[in-house]
């Protein structure tokens, strides 16, 4: 039974006792008056109905007081419990962070590699190649230790350079995908291999001025027509390789206007979006960057849209073209749509 229930029972019992005593006293008073032992004058004993009504009021007041006291106590307990829960959650987060840190530290202590670095140099933009110098530092080694860099199924031997360091070089193709890179350490006839997770997948990012945009745009719809205003900034790396930059505004697959944004791209200044663009259900940017090396980079992106149309051919893409205009690389996130369209066209033919 709860505390409030116990109080109610006790108060009901007390009320019943008071009512019974009052009725008994009242009846005895009436008997004395009837026998002439007492005069029927002003009596200090109230009638039973008045006694019951008074006790009922007192009982209600008592219940209200008990409820208020218990409510305040319950609120205090809830606040205390909430504070304890918050403290427990904070300690749990701190413990989880500490456990994660200890796991990472243990993993570092167990790994053979303490450092893996690489440097890309001597780009040959005619052959689309570059030299990649790789340096590996081991935690433990001996004079018989052999180290290999495994990349795209090929093993590149790394020569010892002292103090646990091993160094090697290989020629990489700028537009070839490199994945599954790892380092193998051979010691006493036993080979141990560890993955290198942050090794570059493509090396052209180190040389070509690839498009990147920071938008500050707002859109609205009025009379079933889309409106857009604001500005954007072209954040392009390797500005020294920029020959020209052109931004084309499009909607519904149609070109609306083109602007020469070479100066703004070189200076990193904001470009105001034209306010008279007749937009349909989307605003699309196509950014064309001509590099001094002869390569051309073209990126098409949906900036604002009511319904994404990326499943359609050429709705979005990122492509690099060679000096002769041939396609040398395309982002696989978009190329699958073009390939699917070409396959459908071949089957239809």
Image (cartoon, grey):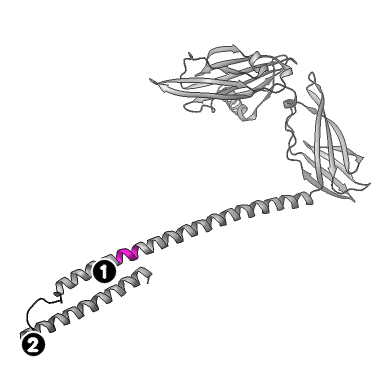
Residue on which disc 2 sits: 37
As helix, strand or loop, the secondary structure at mark 1 comes to helix
The residue at 62%/14% (across/down) is: 261
Q: Which residues are magenta?
A: 63-67
Percent position (x, y) of residue 179?
73, 36
Answer left or right for 263 relative to 275. right
The residue at 10%/76% (across/down) is: 42
Number of residues whose C-alpha sits closer than 10 Å to that of mark 2, classed few (under 14), some (14–19) or many (20 or more): few
Percent position (x, y) of residue 90?
58, 53
As helix, strand or loop, the secondary structure at mark 2 comes to loop
- Decide: is 199 above or below 271: below
Magenta includes 175?
no
Residue 313 in sight here: no
Which mark is drawn over residue 59? 1
> Which of the 4 quarters of the picture holds residue 270?
top right
The residue at 18%/78% (across/down) is: 22
Q: Magenta-highlighted stretch: main secondary structure? A: helix
Percent position (x, y) of residue 117?
80, 36
The residue at 13%/84% (across/down) is: 28
């Amino acid at each position: 039974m709860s505390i409030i229930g116990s109080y109610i029972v006790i108060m009901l019992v007390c009320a019943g006792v008071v009512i019974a005593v009052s009725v008994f006293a009242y009846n005895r008073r009436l008997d004395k008056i009837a026998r002439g032992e007492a005069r029927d004058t002003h009596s200090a004993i109230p009638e039973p109905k008045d006694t019951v009504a008074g006790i009922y009021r007192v009982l209600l007041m008592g219940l209200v007081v008990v409820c208020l006291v218990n409510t305040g106590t319950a609120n205090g307990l809830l606040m205390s419990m909430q504070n304890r829960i918050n403290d427990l959650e904070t300690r749990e987060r701190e413990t989880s962070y500490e456990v994660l840190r200890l796991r990472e530290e243990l993993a570092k202590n167990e790994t053979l590699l303490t450092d893996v670095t690489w440097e890309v140099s001597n780009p040959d933009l005619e052959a689309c190649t570059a030299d990649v110098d790789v340096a590996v530092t081991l935690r433990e080694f001996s004079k018989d230790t052999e180290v290999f860099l495994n990349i795209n199924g090929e093993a590149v031997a790394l020569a010892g350079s002292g103090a646990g360091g091993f160094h090697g070089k290989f020629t990489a193709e700028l537009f070839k995908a490199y994945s599954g890179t790892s380092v193998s350490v051979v010691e006493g006839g036993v080979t141990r291999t560890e993955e290198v997770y942050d090794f570059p997948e493509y090396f052209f990012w180190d040389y070509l001025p690839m498009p990147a945009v920071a938008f500050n745009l707002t859109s609205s719809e009025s009379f079933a027509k889309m409106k857009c205003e604001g500005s954007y900034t072209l954040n392009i790396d390797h500005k020294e390789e920029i020959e020209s930059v052109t931004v084309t505004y499009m909607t519904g697959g149609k070109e609306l206007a083109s602007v020469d944004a070479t100066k703004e791209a070189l200076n990193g200044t904001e470009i105001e979006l034209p306010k008279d663009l007749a937009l349909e259900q989307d605003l699309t940017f196509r950014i064309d960057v001509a590099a001094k090396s002869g390569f051309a980079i073209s990126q098409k992106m949906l900036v604002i849209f009511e319904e994404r149309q990326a499943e359609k051919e050429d709705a979005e893409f990122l492509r690099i073209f060679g000096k002769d205009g041939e396609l040398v690389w395309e982002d696989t996130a978009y190329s699958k749509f073009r390939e699917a369209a070409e396959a459908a066209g071949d089957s239809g033919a």
